Image (cartoon, rainbow, N blue to C red):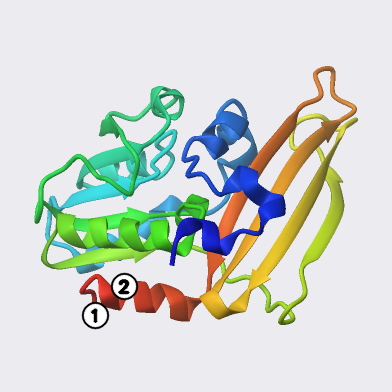
């Protein structure tokens, strides 16, 4: 299966691997808009219960260090990896950081006790093939018995053969007089265990209106399990 096989011709602009798309769209507002998405301490507690003291943890797509800083505070040795140097420079925590694509990790084999990829970051890889490569790279980096944690959402079931376009309006996260219009198109590819969702956040009524494009390739839990099994996970 080639990456292009997932995407119809009308969506040619997303067939290329563009790992920096999300960062280009959201780095300047990420902490303000999404800083309270979840409680990073939940991840710290879970890893402390499963990993040795002072374990080495690699976070893929670490961004501005929202989770990596908490892991560091929990006693772990942390390496944050993100393709966006702008995101990494936004971090105020003191974990080690490397700018790199998470499908080709610039670290040795069997060096980490745990690898985590949080908050739908795996979905930013545009095809199942790329996501499988990321999962295989995580397996390579882990010591025997190491832990790989994927945090992602499960999309609502789509009707076979039916694609969907949606438009919704939400209050602007920072400007009470403005709105955010979210335009999405979902391309159902059930035979691949994946849906491709492309979208744009359009800020309306702000002094500096901006369009923020993004894309997600959403796998079913079964497809993630299959890729993990292929990479040697149990």
**Residue 143 coordinates in the image, percent (x, y):** 10, 61
Side (left or right) of 172 relative to 64: right
Q: Check residue 234 in the rendering and tell me which mark sits there, or answer none.
A: 1
Q: Position of residue 119 (x, y in %)?
A: 49, 54
Mark 1 lies on a secondary structure that is: loop
User: Toward which corner of the image does residue 101 lie, by quadrant?
Assistant: top left
The relative height of residue 206 versus residue 47 in the rendered view (above or below) is: above
As drawn, 79 above or below 160: above
Q: Residues within 10 Å of mark 2 (few under 14, many from 20)?
A: many
In-front residue for pair 173/83: 83
C-alpha span from label 1 to label 2: 8 Å
Q: 9 left or right of 52? A: right
Question: Is any atom of residue 31 visible in this view?
Answer: yes
Which of the pair 97/200 is nearer the observer? 200
Residue receiving disc 2: 228
- Label 1 or label 2, whichever comes before in sequence order: 2
């Amino acid at each position: 299966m080639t990456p292009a096989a997932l995407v119809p011709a009308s969506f040619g602009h997303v067939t290329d691997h563009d790992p920096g798309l999300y960062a280009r769209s959201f780095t300047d507002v990420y902490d303000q808009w999404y800083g309270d998405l979840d409680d990073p301490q939940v991840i710290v507690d879970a890893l402390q219960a499963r990993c040795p003291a002072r374990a080495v943890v690699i976070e893929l797509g670490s961004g501005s260090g929202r989770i990596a800083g908490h892991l560091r505070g929990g006693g772990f040795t942390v390496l944050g990896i993100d393709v966006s140097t702008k995101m990494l420079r936004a971090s105020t925590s003191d974990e080690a950081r490397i700018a790199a694509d998470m499908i080709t990790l610039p670290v040795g084999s069997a060096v980490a006790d745990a690898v985590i990829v949080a908050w739908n970051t795996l979905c930013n890889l545009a095809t199942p093939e790329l996501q499988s490569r990321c999962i295989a790279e995580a397996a390579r980096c882990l010591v025997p018995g190491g832990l790989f944690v994927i945090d992602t959402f499960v999309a609502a079931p789509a009707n076979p053969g039916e694609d969907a376009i949606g438009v919704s309006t939400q209050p602007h996260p920072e400007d009470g007089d403005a709105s955010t219009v979210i335009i999405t198109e979902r391309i159902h590819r059930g035979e691949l265990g994946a849906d491709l969702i492309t979208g744009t956040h359009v800020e309306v009524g702000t002094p500096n209106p901006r369009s923020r494009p993004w894309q997600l390739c959403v796998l079913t839990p079964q497809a993630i399990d299959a890729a993990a099994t292929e990479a040697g996970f149990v």
